[in-house]
Image: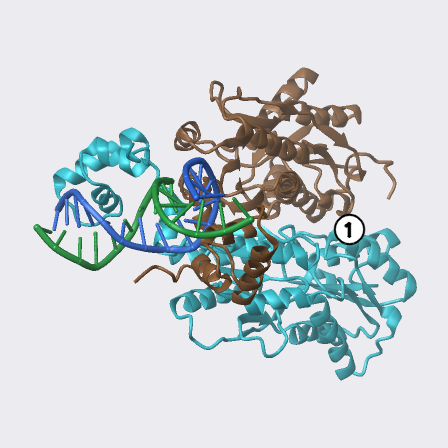
Chain colours: A cyan, B brown, C blue, D green
Amino acid sequence: MASRRSTLHLVAEHAGVSIASVSRVLNGLPASESVTERVQRAAAELGYVPDATARSLKVGRTEQISLAVADVGNPVYVSMMHAVADVLTQSGYRLVISSTGNDPADQIDLLENLNRGYVDGMILSPLRVTEPLLDRIRGSRLPLVIIGSLPDGIDVDSVRADSREGVGLAVDHLADQGRRRIAFLNGPIDTVPGTARLAGYLTAMERLGLATSGDMQVEASDFTFAAGLVAAETLLQQCNPDAIVCSNDLLAVGALKAAARRGLSIPEELAIVGMDDTDIAQLTTPTLSSVDLGAVRRAQTAARLLLDRLADPDRPARHPIVRPSLTVRESSTAGAGS
Amino acid sequence: MASRRSTLHLVAEHAGVSIASVSRVLNGLPASESVTERVQRAAAELGYVPDATARSLKVGRTEQISLAVADVGNPVYVSMMHAVADVLTQSGYRLVISSTGNDPADQIDLLENLNRGYVDGMILSPLRVTEPLLDRIRGSRLPLVIIGSLPDGIDVDSVRADSREGVGLAVDHLADQGRRRIAFLNGPIDTVPGTARLAGYLTAMERLGLATSGDMQVEASDFTFAAGLVAAETLLQQCNPDAIVCSNDLLAVGALKAAARRGLSIPEELAIVGMDDTDIAQLTTPTLSSVDLGAVRRAQTAARLLLDRLADPDRPARHPIVRPSLTVRESSTAGAGS
DNA sequence: CTGAAAGCGCTTACAG
DNA sequence: CTGAAAGCGCTTACAG
């Protein structure tokens, strides 16, 4: 009646040793040659695979980290995933990814809850920061790092872009080219990037003494190609800009398309600048000027913050900021070549 | 000396009941009003969160399914992820995603191994099917569904596109438009889609009696924008096609770019057709004709196959095939409008 | 170096 | 309805 169906027990039985010895051999701990060999043979014959949940329960760690991003469809998140994975893998963690989609907070808190237990820590890049989400962030027992800005006074590691400076680079560049009617094609304003990038636009325009009437700003329903196209068509219809700063590259592709439909020549009649500097910026025709908001560096930094936090749960929280840079291409300068 | 640090024990102590009662209440099993109330209050006060690994160890299920795709950066995989997630969520499973990147089999087998234990089943869409990977697929104890074609005789559920018919749709369409020098811009040929789509191209060209010299076929190093651009430039240099069938939409965007650089007008001088019919096909200028290989349907089907397999481990394996369709846009027809 | 035993935090028959 | 107890499959002091 003994419980010998246990797989570890099975291997032990086949090898004629105790389960402790099996465990040790399989974990590379010291064992005699004969035991080692018998265990390895038995394990191979039986096709033994250790049960990860049992191990985790015992040792209190899963060696898994979860990354939750708003939209796996946005290439900028893809490069962030790879950056996070690289850093974590080097420290022996595996990365599991969850896409929270576009749904409101419940999607996110679901995720937060569910991940408890299967991961040792979490990196969260929320598109919208709602009160319920903040509650979960504050109350998290799991080590947590946020990518994006957070209200003051929340004692959780985070890293963010300097959106203000980033959008400023785009606006300054366009103004340098003699553009004056610089419009802003934003994503949803109730999102973290939507809010930050709009603030950056308004600040920069004010600093330069340029007008920012309401009809020069438009809010796409989503940070996607399709939404960018629709919003850009509205924008081109309601004002007469000589330049558009777009809140990300996907929106900018939509703007390029809208301009093409209206027969506007780019950059002569209309200059366009994107944001995030994703791969696609080099492949559009014309190529797209874009502000790199340091997505890869933010991701790497987030991973390192998390590793440090795992190593020392009591260290003070940090909130580094990553600096942006602008890459100028054809969409905003007449003589930029092919 | 008793082990009462256990969180479940803690709640039980606070509520003045046994851990069994706590477990029951928290799992919605019948309990008296008074016990229910005390447990819920205690759990709330303590901010109790059940340990998922312990629960999984006991019940033998994690309620998690893993989806491993070759490249999270390809939009077609993103739509597949969403489709899988939708189906699984309705059945109470959570989806965790792993990107296997571009590395060879070891990446994949790593993943296979590591997922054991934290998930109840797995959907795998391998870019390359190597012998070691096949070994793991055959030897998997975990319920497994493959998206893509598999050698005959492997008794694992799978679903695939009809690439032959799909590429055939593109070639037939171009031939209907009077194109004769139809080139093929493929991704790496040692990949599952690379092999299948090339076969489809050759079959269709032969059926139509069109020439397929070696210089009319080119193999990009990757299924990406950047690789497509490089390969398309080679192609345009080494032959003089009047049409290019591209193995996916990303490659097609690269081809559009290469054509623009050479000043070729599309579709007049060169027609281009992509594959996968992703969002981007509608946003390029000109818009991109593309073959939908049924990615979403493949994903949904895979999820359902897995659910059925979980419900009945002994049912015979199935291998459905999804039919393709072609959407014609500006890049392949002169009069397609704006 | 090796084995017997305790215990990780849960769930679930089994009695009462 | 409720509690005491066994056990999921591992790891790890503790003796020997």
Residue D5 lies in what quarter of the image?
top left
Q: Can residue B92 be seen by looking at this rendering?
A: yes
Q: For the N terminus of chain B, which image quadrant?
A: bottom left
Rate crowding at label 1 as few (under 14), some (14 to 19) or many (20 or more) other CA atoms within 10 Å: many
Q: Amino acid at mark 1?
A: Ala
Residue B279 vs residue A267, the one in the foreground: B279
Q: Position of residue B138 (x, y in %)?
A: 42, 27
Callout 1 secondary element? helix
Q: Circle 1 sits on which residue?
A: A226
Rendering coords of residue A111 (x, y %): 59, 54
Give me the residue at 74% from left, 52% from top.
A225
Position in image of residue A132 (x %, y %): 66, 65
At x 82% / y 79%, what residue is drawn? A210
Tell me how many marks there are.
1
Chain under numbered label 1: A
Residue in the image at 72% along x and 52% along y: A285
Q: Is B313 positioned to the left or the right of A231 in the image? A: left
Give the answer, above or below, for where A168 lies relative to A90.
below
State the image quarter where residue A214 is shown: bottom right
Q: Nearer the viewer, residue B242 or A125?
A: A125
Find the residue positioned furthest to the right.
A238
Q: Residue at x 72, y 46 (%)?
A: B280
Residue A79 can be seen in this image: no
**Is B158 on the left-hand or right-hand side of A118?**
right
Placement of the C terminus of chain B among the 4 image quadrants: top right
Between B120 and B295, the one nearer to me in the picture: B120
Q: Relative to B231, is A328 above or below?
A: below
Q: Measuring from the top left, give residue B91's x and y in whole percent.
A: 62, 38
